[in-house]
């Protein structure tokens, strides 16, 4: 089965497991490039789930929550790599949720400018093939690093727009989809190739999930003789700023270096 066919099947499985319609609100240290501020054509090429994670807001513990992060390829001059290939940027971990004030719900509505998606994996692939949802993405600068004085660039989470001319409503010329950029790591359907495609600090974060014991991921790692606990403190590089990401507060953006795409899950 081709990678594209496998990705489509895995995306549909994940959507069925989630059984959630994101269009319906519920009331209630690796150095990265400093990208220019402004807008660029982008495609959503990655969706990474972290399981149910410990959660806090302003230093106070809250109930654990499922978390995820998104990966975007940016294409315009000044944002792309020097050789013209797309550069990858990603969000920090974001809490899943459909509260109308939540970061996830607001973000989903922005990305779903064509009204086609009901779950995150719909932005990556659907029954018709790869989608890699195109958008206009805004890069902003912020202060980060250990002393919070270093200028960094990242995704403005409330700065997405449809990739179309605001006057004529015609779509801009969109870059072709490159299946080699697609990244998909699903909590319910983990693969060893997908796991190995994650940076070490992401693996460490995922291993802290409160529902890791007894999970499909734990079984996968034990079966293949892989560590099932995060690396001791001091052995992992500081690759992004610490984040206190409550259900109803925005996530700080985190830029990343371009890296090889993950292998796609192979359904039976």
Image (cartoon, rainbow, N blue to C red):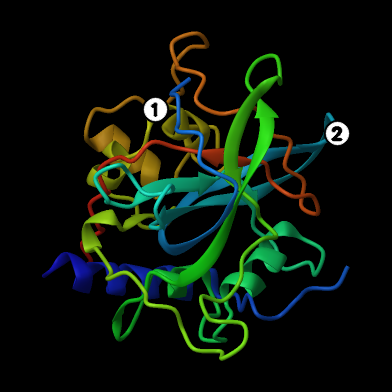
| Residue 210, image quadrant | top right
Q: Position of residue 45 (x, y in %)?
A: 38, 60
Q: Are marks 2 and 1 in contact (CB under 8 Å)?
A: no
Front residue (pair 80, 147): 80
| Residue 152, image quadrant | top right
Q: Is residue 213 visible?
A: yes
Front residue (pair 173, 127): 173
For label 2, the SS is loop
The vertical placement of 39 against 4, above or below, is above
Q: Position of residue 225 (x, y in %)?
A: 24, 28
The vertical placement of 239 against 72, above or below, is above
Report the residue marked by disc 1: 200
| Residue 58, image quadrant | top right
| Residue that lies at the very extreme toward the right in this rendered image | 28
Residue at image coords 21%, 70%: 4
Residue at image coords 43%, 23%: 30
Residue at image coords 63%, 28%: 151
Front residue (pair 203, 79): 79
Task: Report how far apart the C-alphas of labels 2 and 1 lie in the structure.
Answer: 26 Å
- Left or right, residue 25 beside residue 36: right
The vertical placement of 195 against 42, above or below, is above
Q: Is residue 268 visible?
A: no
Q: Position of residue 192 (x, y in %)?
A: 25, 43
> Which quadrant of the figure contains the N terminus?
bottom left
For label 1, the SS is helix
- Left or right, residue 84 beside residue 241: left
Marker disc for residue 245: none
> Which quadrant of the figure contains the C terminus?
bottom left
Report the residue marked by disc 2: 58
């Amino acid at each position: 089965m081709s990678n594209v066919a496998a990705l489509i099947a895995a995306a549909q499985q994940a959507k069925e497991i989630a059984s959630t319609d994101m269009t319906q609100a519920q009331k209630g240290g690796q150095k990265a490039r400093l990208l220019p501020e402004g807008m660029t054509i982008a495609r959503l090429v990655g969706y990474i789930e972290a399981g149910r994670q410990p959660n806090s807001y302003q230093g106070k513990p809250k109930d654990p929550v499922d978390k995820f992060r998104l990966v975007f390829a940016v294409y315009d001059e000044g944002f792309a790599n020097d050789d013209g290939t797309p550069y990858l940027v990603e969000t920090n971990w974001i809490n899943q949720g459909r509260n109308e004030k939540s970061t996830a719900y607001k973000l989903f509505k922005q990305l779903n400018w064509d009204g086609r998606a009901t779950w995150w994996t719909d932005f990556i692939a659907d029954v018709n093939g790869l989608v890699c949802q195109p958008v206009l993405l805004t890069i902003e600068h912020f202060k980060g690093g250990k002393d919070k004085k270093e200028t960094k660039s990242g995704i403005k989470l409330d700065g997405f727009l449809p990739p179309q001319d605001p006057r004529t409503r015609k779509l801009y010329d969109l870059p072709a989809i490159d299946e080699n950029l697609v990244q998909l790591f699903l909590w319910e359907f983990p693969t060893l190739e997908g796991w190995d495609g994650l940076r070490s600090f992401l693996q460490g974060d995922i291993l802290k999930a409160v529902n890791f014991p007894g999970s499909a991921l734990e079984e996968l790692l034990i079966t293949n003789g892989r560590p099932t606990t995060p690396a001791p403190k001091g052995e992992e590089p500081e690759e992004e700023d610490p984040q206190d990401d409550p259900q109803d507060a925005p996530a700080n953006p985190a830029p990343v270096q371009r890296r090889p795409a993950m292998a796609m899950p192979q359904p039976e």
